[in-house]
Amino acid sequence: MANAAENRNAKPGFGTRFVNFFKGIGKSFKNMYHELKKVTWPTKKELLNYSVVVFVFMVVMGVIIGVIDIASGALVDLIVKL
């Protein structure tokens, strides 16, 4: 009876852990593959539209941040000159 309890609490050997590690990785990739099959991929036209929207947003935000940067720099120069 004591041997059965000790075997359950014993740490598995290096070989077993090594094999289980790679089985886990394989299972993760298999699950990822099955999930990617469920994805609805955008068409070429939709992808182009999404890319244009992102690019325009980046340009607009760049201009806004640039204006804020220039204005805050001018404000700091004004404060320093006083």
Image (cartoon, grey):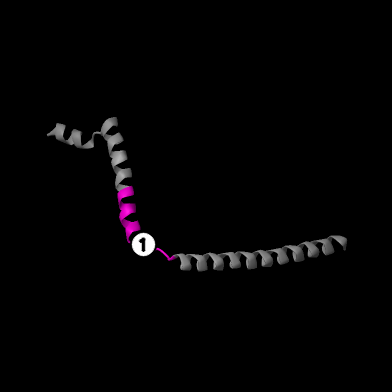
Against 34, residue 16 (above or below) is above
Q: Quadrant of the C terminus?
A: bottom right
Against 32, residue 47 (above or below) is below
Q: Is residue 44 left or right of residue 66?
A: left
Q: Quadrant of residue 39?
A: bottom left
Classify 10 Å Cα crowding around label 1: few (below 14), some (14-19), many (20 and above): few
Residue 5 place in picture, x, y as percent: 17, 36
Picture residue at 28% right of the left edge, 41% below the top? 23
Residue 46 place in picture, x, y as percent: 47, 68
Q: Is 35 colored magenta in this rendering?
A: yes
Q: Is 3 colored magenta in this rendering?
A: no
> In the image, which residues are magenta?
29-43
Amino acid at dot 1: Val
Task: Name the foreground residue: 9 vs 67.
Answer: 67
Picture residue at 79% right of the left edge, 65% below the top? 75
Task: Please give the count of numbered marks on the rendered protein.
Answer: 1
Q: Which element type, helix, strand or loop, lies under badge 1?
A: loop
Circle 1 residue: 39
Q: Is residue 61 left or right of residue 32?
A: right
Q: Residue furthest left?
A: 1
Task: Name the foreground residue: 1 vs 51.
Answer: 51
Q: Residue furthest right?
A: 82
- Prevailing secondary structure of the magenta residues: helix
Picture residue at 56% right of the left edge, 67% below the top? 52
Q: Quadrant of the N terminus?
A: top left
